Amino acid sequence: MNYFKKTLHGVSWMAAFRITTRGITFLRLFILARLLDPYMFGLFGIAALVLAFLETITETGINVFLIQHDEPLEKYVDTAWVVSIIRGTLISGLILISARFVSDFFKSPAAFSLITLMALIPFIRGFINPSSVRFQKNLEFNKEFLYRLTIFLVDSSVAVLLAFYIRSATSLVWGLIVGATAEVLLSHLFIQPRPRLAFEISKIKKVVDRGKWLTLAGVMQYLFQNGDNIVVGKLLGVGQLGFYDMAYKISILPITEVSDVFGKVTFPAYTQIQSDRPRLKIAFLKTVLGISILVIPIGLLLFTFSQQVVLLLLGENWTSIVDVLKLLSIFAIIRAIYGSTGALFLAVKKQEYLTVMTLVNILGLAISIVPLVHKYGIIGAAMAALIGQIAAIPLAIYYLNKVFKPSHEAID
């Protein structure tokens, strides 16, 4: 099967997965928005910020490393598993240590118990079999579809069922805990090779050396994606954070899922042709065109019918997010198209490009967000996110020109 057919096959399966899971996500939001109030979503948002931050700063880049390199998985899977277990345990400990500080920072004592419960998730995830990247590496997206969908269904079902009974943000955390447990079990029962508790220092050093830019890029991306949430939660309170986070989810889910589908498929596909720059350029341009054709109409529909979307999905209690949703739908279009560069830069092993681009995103957000939030509330936060996203577009174009510039030198 040639590159185009493999990519089309992969996109079809990943699109099926994303459409299915996002349909379930919207159904879950539809139900949970009527069972839990914005304050509950705000509490969960605080706990999720802590988990995402600690997972980001301890990112090893092992999964990307395993996909990028031609060696068989057996060579690194044991080392990858040991590193993953250590990382998960470290994150759990840091969450427990930071729980009181975070709840005090957001002036939300109720967040403390939720954050401590969240500490179970990274510990459990640490035991996932690293060989699960085999599906992406080998472009076996039909298997990836079944694997991921099963985990997602477990997570969503538990969250919704518990919300019916306890009417608490705790139900969302338990959904993640049970989902993580399911992933550990599935990864060891059905995916080969199974790892052993063994590692080699030389292999760890090799992975860390390649992954350091991914770690830094991840930290930068976290700050850009969550800086607005942090400022909103700190300046406007947990309730307003719940409103803003919901508007962000509604705008991002249908649009960036398109770019995520393409990113999941094109990263391993680009990796296979990364030494053929003319072919790589054509493949990238086709990807950008495909993403644009799909996301622009979706974004325009969200912008035009934002009030109807909010009333249909969430109900009258959430109508204050309509104007925020309009701005974030534009943000999501730009982010989806701009984000198509990520898979390309990873494939050509230019992780540092992503780091610098995200730094510019953060600067745009950081300079504008506090004054805009003070003046316009959560609408100002959406404005700042849009400014930050636009800020790095010229730099992305510059790096693309560098990658595709004719050269006799091989890509490192």
Image (spheres, helix red, strand yellow):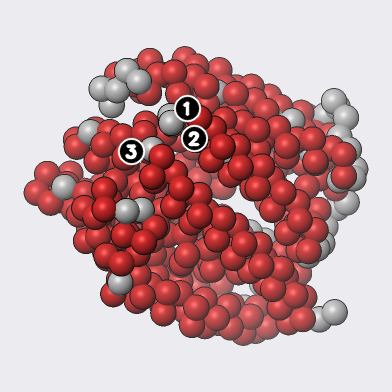
In front of the other: 280 or 340? 340
Number of the label disc, if any, that sits on residue 166 = 1
Kind of element beneath mark 2? helix
Q: Which residue appears at 45% of the width and 23% of the height?
A: 114
* Image position, residue 261 (x, y; %): 60, 65
Quarter in which the N terminus is drawn: bottom right
Number of the label disc, if any, that sits on residue 194 = none
- Is residue 359 found left or right of 73 in the rendered image? left
Q: Which residue appears at 80% of the width and 41% of the height?
A: 187
Contact (CB < 8 A) between labels 1 and 2? Answer: yes
Q: Earlier in the sequence, mark 1 or mark 3?
A: 3
Residue type of the residue flagged with mark 2: Ala
Q: Which residue appears at 81% of the width and 53% of the height?
A: 134
- Cα separation, mark 1 vs mark 2, equals 5 Å
Residue bearing the label numbered 3: 37
Kind of element beneath mark 3? loop
Residue type of the residue flagged with mark 3: Asp
Q: Earlier in the sequence, mark 2 or mark 3?
A: 3
